[in-house]
Image (cartoon, rainbow, N blue to C red):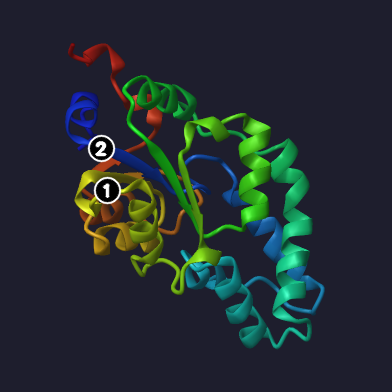
């Protein structure tokens, strides 16, 4: 069931978005980076790697990767290398997913504040917001570096709600992966799953775990807005 645009207008006090795979179409790039990075140390990308790191903060991914593959570099060096590999893509090539800009404009017109809660790094978040010229749509931006536990723990969503000055139940979250959906539900928030072809979750499971589901933000019906 997709969320009613009138329900959002009348009942939702804030909307919080995941970044990668939800607002922006970036997940395929990370597959390429993972392949290239692990190859430096003589490893192929395991089939289960993306699922294992899903929802983890940037730091947590580095800790997991270092331990699993015995990477000799420091955690800080690993994160810097990933940032360097991804920065040009986030600054120059990553697109918004279809319908996102229209939805952000609608929320701004309705005076519904928006936040971002992402496991990605602050550097890459800043780069893509500047590139896509959407920074001004968001009053709160939280990254995994600001909380103790990454998704599926609720920390990042509770932190975002706190910055918004709202109860979790007053927020609607948009997420594309299972760990993120579980994090928002654990925080006590309404959740709308968003389809992404690179997410490691089936449509049926996403629908079962979430309150609402969208194949695309283009499915939102603005012509039905009342008042």
Q: Quadrant of the C terminus?
A: top left
| Left or right: 157, with 225 as reference point | right
Judged from the image, the secondary structure of the residue bearing numbered disc 1 is: loop
Residue 37's disc is none
Q: Tell which of 179 and 153 is nearer to you.
A: 153
Q: Residues within 10 Å of mark 1 (few under 14, many from 20)?
A: some
Residue corresponding to mark 2: 13
In which quadrant of the rendered view does residue 182 lie?
A: bottom left
Q: Earlier in the sequence, mark 2 or mark 1?
A: 2
Residue corresponding to mark 1: 166
Residue 202 showing in the rendered view = no
Residue 157, horizontal then vertical, whole percent: 36, 57
For image coordinates 38% across by 45% down, the residue present is: 16
For image coordinates 55% across by 74% down, the residue present is: 60
Q: Tell which of 6 and 166 is nearer to you.
A: 166
Relative height, residue 153 to residue 24 (above, below): below
For image coordinates 31% across by 39% down, the residue present is: 14
The residues bearing labels 2 and 1 have C-alpha atoms spaced at a distance of: 8 Å
For image coordinates 44% across by 73% down, the residue present is: 149
Q: Residues within 10 Å of mark 2 (few under 14, many from 20)?
A: some
Q: Are marks 2 and 1 in contact (CB under 8 Å)?
A: yes
Residue 15, horizontal then vertical, whole percent: 34, 40
């Amino acid at each position: 069931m997709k969320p009613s645009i009138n329900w959002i207008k009348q009942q939702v006090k804030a909307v919080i978005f995941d970044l990668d795979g939800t607002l922006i179409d970036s997940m395929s790039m990370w597959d390429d980076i993972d392949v290239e990075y692990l190859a430096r140390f003589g490893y192929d990308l395991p089939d289960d790697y993306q699922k294992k790191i899903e929802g983890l903060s940037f730091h947590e991914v580095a800790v997991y990767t270092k331990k699993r593959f015995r990477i000799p570099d420091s955690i800080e060096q690993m994160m810097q290398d990933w940032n360097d590999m991804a920065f040009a893509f986030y600054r120059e090539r990553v697109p918004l997913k279809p319908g996102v800009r229209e939805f952000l404009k609608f929320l701004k017109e309705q005076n519904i504040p928006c936040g971002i809660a992402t496991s990605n790094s602050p550097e890459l978040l800043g780069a893509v917001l500047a590139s896509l010229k959407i920074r001004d749509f968001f009053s709160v931006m939280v990254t995994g570096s600001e909380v103790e536990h990454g998704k599926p723990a609720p920390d990042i969503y509770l932190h975002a709600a706190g910055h918004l000055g709202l109860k979790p139940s007053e927020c609607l979250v948009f997420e594309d992966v299972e760990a993120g959906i579980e994090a928002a539900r654990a925080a006590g928030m309404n959740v709308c799953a968003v389809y992404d072809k690179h997410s490691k979750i089936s449509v049926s499971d996403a629908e079962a775990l979430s309150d609402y589901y969208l194949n695309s933000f283009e499915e939102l019906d603005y012509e039905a807005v009342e008042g």
